[in-house]
Amino acid sequence: MKKSQRQIVYERAEEYAKKHLKKINVSMGDYDGGQKCHHVARHRLETGEYEILAVALSFVPKSGVNVHFVNRKNSKQEQYVDNTLGYLSKRNIYYLISEHTLEEIQDDDMVKLLVNIKEKILSKLFTDKEKKELGINSTHI
């Protein structure tokens, strides 16, 4: 049986994450239900509820891997919170890509930030030739 692009990306990303990224604990927060985690996490910075926006690889069992945005209260606290997926985040496994304060991303377009991070991660997982041959693009992560 031929593997889907999402499965291929999942497998490569899982191997990469285990070798190069820190696994983090993420608690369920509020459930937003949308697919706009980058906006939800940014909003939580803007309200002052959280001080840190964290970008992670979120491995969803039997589904795939996503670049996903979560929050944490401050640099001293190790607990991350997912206010987009809420209870759906309980079974996911997260690996930290980067962290940002509001000051650091104040002028950033959140959609562009998301796309740029997706492309950066895919470039670490696949060569341009592999992406073309396998039909891999940013919708697969």
Image (tube, rainbow, N blue to C red):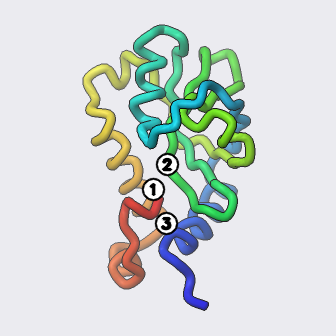
Circles 1 and 2: CB atoms closer than 8 Å:
yes
Q: Is residue 35 above or below residue 123?
A: above
Q: CA distance from mark 3 to mark 2?
A: 13 Å
Circles 1 and 3: CB atoms closer than 8 Å:
yes
Three-letter residue code for mark 1: Ile
Residue 138: where, in percent of width, then height?
A: 37, 60
Viewer-proximal residue among 42 and 85:
85
Viewer-proximal residue among 127 and 57:
57
At mark 3, the secondary structure is helix
Three-letter residue code for mark 3: Leu
Q: Residues within 10 Å of mark 3 (few under 14, many from 20)?
A: some
User: Which tag is nearer the camera, tag 3 or tag 2?
Assistant: 2
Image-quadrant location for residue 133:
bottom left
- Residue assigned mark 3: 125
The residue located at (60%, 15%) in the rendering is: 74
Viewer-proximal residue among 7 and 13:
7
Q: Residues within 10 Å of mark 1 (few under 14, many from 20)?
A: some
Three-letter residue code for mark 2: Val
Circles 3 and 2: CB atoms closer than 8 Å:
no
